[in-house]
Image (tube, rainbow, N blue to C red):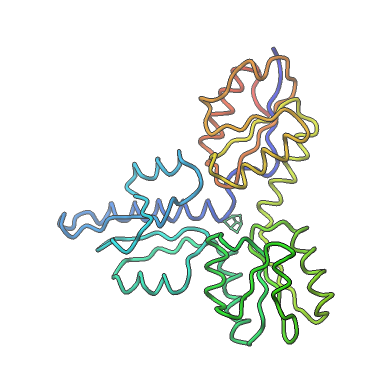
Amino acid sequence: MKGRIVTAKNSGFCFGVKRAIDIAENTVNSAGKNSGRKRSTKRLIYSLGPLIHNPQEVKRLEKKGIKVVENPSVLKNATLILRTHGIPQGLKEKLRFQNLTLVDATCPFVKKAQDIVQKLALGNEKIIIVGERKHPEVKALVSYGGDRCFVVEKDSDLRDIDFSGSVAIVSQTTQSPENFSRFVKIIKELNPKAKTFDTICRATFDRQTSARKLSKRADAMVIVGGKNSGNTKRLAQICSEFTKTYYVETAKELKSAWFKGKKIVGISAGASTPGWIVREVKKKLEGFLKEPPR
Ligand code: F3S
């Protein structure tokens, strides 16, 4: 059995996730340096929810000393790392009152969208946010614009909005450009003066485009990432439209029989999949294919 591994051009950690992991590791390292304090005064480090949607990486960080907490109101004398999605403004204030040290790992692209919403709200604009209502990023965005914000997830959401006056359209960072443009077009028909702020981050889109392209010429695709990661799941869905696709969290799940007689095996990974897991998967695949990866 001979074959080769080809990695998708855009794959794995996005800028914001990589930055969040670096921030978390720096936080732990500098806490280690200050561990000369008395045990009773040592601050524990938490992340508000899992830092990323990857169980193995969350476990690795846990071993380094970052515990996941879902309900931060119970914390005292602790350091709390905030995730890439950002958190509602009110919650941030509340946590500060609790005397927690906040380490903000909100992705700069998300922060930019928050700043735009806040500015628009101060200008008394009606803000249409194209995104998933229940997503933490959208909940946080809404907190910056308060009752000036209207979230649009599906066409029927448009029915309840009065589009007269000053209207601005903003996007959740991970929306697809097609979906955003479609809503912009509909809204502009209702209010031609509506202003558009394209706050989409291309990381998700780029990973999807590269994986789609590769899956069209690969005999099989391996998508690596947490089963709880929405963007990884989506990569697997896209690739399975074009070729046999295996969605794995770790190298342990790979089976040699899957790759028997395959000439090109493509690999891609979600924006929350760490490089060390992808490397383990590649190594095992190399063994199956008996040829070094490109
Ligand atoms: Fe940020 Fe884009 Fe990643 S918004 S967290 S760089 S997907």
Q: List x then y, in percent, for residue 285.
A: 61, 23
Q: List x then y, in percent, for residue 86.
A: 50, 64
Q: List x then y, in percent, for residue 16.
A: 55, 56
Q: Residue at x 19, y 55 (%)?
A: 36
- Say if 195 sits above or below 58 in the image: below
- Say if 217 sits above or below 262 in the image: below
Q: Residue at x 27, y 54 (%)?
A: 33
Q: Is residue 187 left or right of residue 106?
A: right
Q: Nearer the viewer, residue 37 or 221?
A: 221
Q: Nearer the viewer, residue 186 or 25?
A: 186
Q: Quadrant of residue 234?
A: top right
Q: Is residue 216 left or right of residue 3?
A: right
Q: Residue at x 51, y 47 (%)?
A: 53
Q: Where's ligand 1: which quadrant?
A: bottom right
- Say if 213 sits above or below 116 in the image: above
Q: Nearer the viewer, residue 293 or 263?
A: 263
Count of numbered badges drawn on the protein: 0
User: Which quadrant is the C terminus positioned in?
Assistant: top right
